[in-house]
Image (cartoon, rainbow, N blue to C red):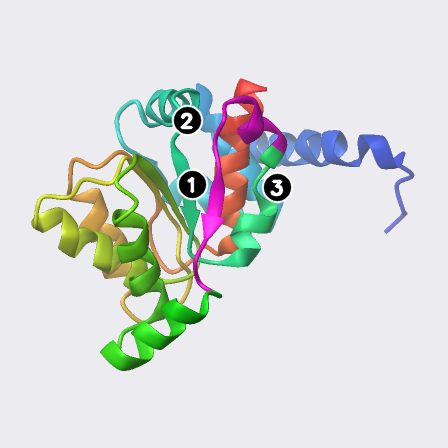
Amino acid sequence: MDIEYVKPSEIEKRSFEILTEELKEKGIKLSGDTASVIKRCIHTTADFDYADTLVFSENAIEDFKALIRNGACIITDTNMALAGINKGVLKQFGCKAQCFMAEEEVAIKAKLSEVTRASVSMEKAIDLGTPVIYVIGNAPTALITLYEHYLKGYRPAFIIGVPVGFVNVVAAKELIIDTDIPYIINRGRKGGSNVAAAICNAILYMMH
């Protein structure tokens, strides 16, 4: 195969042109604001399955935008997802993104309670008492904990739920889909912190 010369400033643009062409070749039609999110996930992973498996609650994009405009807090389940989220756009709207996973008190509580640090992190986020957008790219236990608190009366403002793996991953995602919580979820085993950040950024770029 020949190497295609592309200027550094045009690599991302060219990538989207290629994936858009391939979507057309595959007979996959995307429309509306969700198309931007799906394309961003494909761009991040080179995996076209996201065109079929990424699902959105009704008015998910607008719900997310409204939360950002009103200064909602973003909580991630990995520092990798946190690092990938565009802080510049968040700052414009007075939003903060945080991750509690590396905090010593979280690790201690998780060990004593014999639960994951992700579960403890979610409970700490719930205790903030403010509207929270949960950006979950790694731990299905984070989704399960949020669901358990939902059954007790707590309602997350929004969930991006794309944990990756094999243990309880599929079931945890379906739990959230069956609620009235606004969400963007990738059905199945695929996902990851990079995908979680990509979904978040796709919507933030619409607002930039």
Q: Residue at x 22, y 43 (%)?
A: 177
Instruction: Specify whether residue 92 is painted magenta.
Output: yes
Q: For numbered disc 1, what is the local secondary structure? A: strand
Up-down relation of residue 184 to residue 1 (above or below): above
Identify whether 158 is placed above or below 35: below
Kindly indicate the quadrant of the structure image that contains residue 183: top left
What is the tally of numbered marks visible in this picture?
Answer: 3
> Which residue in the protein does label 1 denote?
74
Query: Farthest residue toward the left?
Result: 152
195 shown above or below 92: below
Disc 1 vs disc 3: which is toward the camera? 1
Q: Residues within 10 Å of mark 2 (few under 14, many from 20)?
A: some
Residue beneath the point at 50% across and 26% down: 94
Query: What amino acid is labelled 3 in the image?
Result: His
Q: CA distance from mark 1 to mark 2?
A: 9 Å
Whether residue 18 is visible: yes
Q: Nearer the viewer, residue 54 or 156?
A: 156
- Which labelled disc corresponds to residue 43? 3
Q: Nearer the viewer, mark 3 or mark 2?
A: 2
Tell which circle, 3 or 2, labels the residue nearer the N-terminal end. 3
136 relative to 208, above or below? below
Residue displayed at 82% across by 30% down = 10
Percent x, y of residue 154: 15, 43
Q: Residue furthest front?
A: 105
Q: Which mark is residue 71?
A: 2
**Residue type pointed to by label 1:** Ile
21 magenta-colored: no
Magenta residues (range): 88-101
**Position of the C terminus by quadrant:** top right
Give the amino acid type for the residue marked by disc 2 in the picture: Gly
What whole-number distance in Å separates the C-alpha atoms at marks 1 and 3? 23 Å
The residue closer to the viewer here, 35 or 177, is 177
